[in-house]
Image (tube, rainbow, N blue to C red):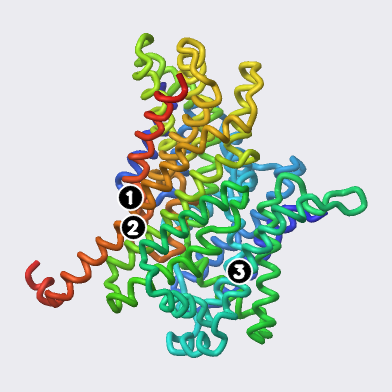
Amino acid sequence: MIKAEWFYWLVGLSFLVMASQMVTDRSNPKRYGTGAFWGLIGAGFIYSSWVVTKQAPAEPLGVAVLVMAALAGFGFTGRGTPRTTTTEERAASAARFGNRLFVPALTIPVVAMACAIGVKHLSFGGEPVLQQGSETILGLGIGAVVALVVGMVMLREKRLSVPVQSGRSMLEAMGWAMLLPQMLATLGAIFQVSGVGDQVGKLTTSVLPKDSLVIAIVVYCVGMFAFTIIMGNAFAAFPVMTAAVGWPVLIGHFHGNAAAVLAIGMLAGFCGTLVTPMAANFNIVPAALLELKDQYGPIKAQLPTAGVLLGCNIVIMTLFAF
Amino acid sequence: MIVLLGVLVVVLGFATKRNPLLVVGVAGIATGLLGGLSPGKVLAAFGEGFAGSRAVTIFAITLPVIGLLERYGLQEQARNLIARFGRLTTGRFLALYLGLRQIGAAVGLTNVFGHAQTVRPLAVPMAEGAAERKYGALPDRTREKVRSFSASADNIGLFFGEDVFLAVGSILLITGFVNTTYGTHLEPLHLALWAIPTAVCAFVVHGWRLLRLDRQLERELLTADVQPSAAVEAAQ
């Protein structure tokens, strides 16, 4: 059975290799801090395998995470000058290989699709080929590995160090943004156990008048939207707002159609995901990956759509759920 | 009530543009301690949070091959390719991408597209190439805008497509939560059907905004041509 952990190890291992390249890169004025940051992330990826199975204590990893945050947060990381091809060389290479360059690039989505549709149902010796519940991650991982092989063979590139160096300069360019989604997932978990959700639920219940259907719908949808902005994730907002307003008031008191109320409520939360820097993997990481100067660029592009769709959700729920 | 201080730390931190890693670290420690966790428990929470959320970073596995192909001119070739489709403007191309992303997510193919595997190497050079064909080299501000809208097409397509698929996390969360908490028997199929009206709205609203991007580019870039940029800078 192909397991998701194997690909976490592969990511961890490549971060460690890239970290060793960073430390020896003299064009980076902060090469030690940069190497330490990515080395810790890489080692953390591998150590985590034993944390999720409770075979190793989580506290040392927690210390390492805070050290990573401090390294990047206090400016000890930087980037070197990437050793890559010039614009002219790229144009010449594009003319030479032409549309064949798309073959490895499209290998990733094609393999991911094949895993999600076909390989998912295959089993070998009574065991499924892919670890269940991780098929989309595995599809991406297998796709990336196959694409790398296809690409190196097609381009007749014999040195594995070339793609690793290219990947490393993309990592350096993204910097701290790469760690942010995982830090925010932690914050969400801490908010949960500390009872932040219950407090927000109590606040919402206290401001909610009991007799107006329209106001209750607006409070549920806007509450999902606002709480998702705070938590960075509609999944964290959903149980809180549903326990406070959705179930007791909209479904219990006003007899709404449960499936419609809950599905549309969740989508109101998704509008919040579009406008919050807390949803770093969707909003901040792409800004770094696309080398934007304004890290809020994607959020600004999404804000008007998110506002209109929040209104749409309120209208759709009012018209069809009651 | 005092645990809400952590939320305030996050809001203030982002508003004053502190480094987000520090903001989140401080907010997490403060909320955990105020909420009655021991320092050891707070550290363990950071460790478990990192270990349990590695899936969001797994896209890094695609970076070496994407980097390799970019070195050999993938982005240049994406620009060359779009140049052959004269009618495909930036806005029309991105609306097409939005539609494909949404349909892909609706049939469960959430990882087939993404910021690392399709937006950076393919969608952005094509969207920029379509504009460059018409206006020549793009000023940085326009480039930023086209890239931001490319990222938005991916996000909006994903968010408002995936809920139409039955086995996606958010649908399973809804059924899991209400069926165990309130003892109901909600079917994933009904929830997925109720996601369709919003999905249609999302495509119409964002697709319209993407098409309007063409007119914005025309206005910005053609007026910039009339006034040489040096004169504009001097006037400011």
Q: Earlier in the sequence, mark 1 or mark 2?
A: 1
SS label for mark 1: loop
C-alpha span from label 3 to label 2: 26 Å
| Amino acid of disc 1 | Lys
Q: Quadrant of residue B225?
A: bottom left
Q: Residue at x 11, y 71 (%)?
A: B232
Quickly name the residue at label 1.
B17
Q: Residue at x 43, y 89 (%)?
A: A88
SS label for mark 3: helix
Q: Quadrant of residue A193?
A: top right
Task: Select label 1 or label 3 by which is in front.
Answer: 3
Q: Chain of mark 1?
A: B
C-alpha span from label 1 to label 3: 37 Å
Q: Are marks 1 and 2 in contact (CB under 8 Å)?
A: no
Quickly name the residue at label 2.
B211
Q: Chain of mark 3?
A: A
Q: Are marks 3 and 2 on the same chain?
A: no
Q: Are marks 1 and 3 on the same chain?
A: no
Q: Is residue B115 above or below residue B121?
A: above
Q: Position of residue B43 (x, y in %)?
A: 58, 40
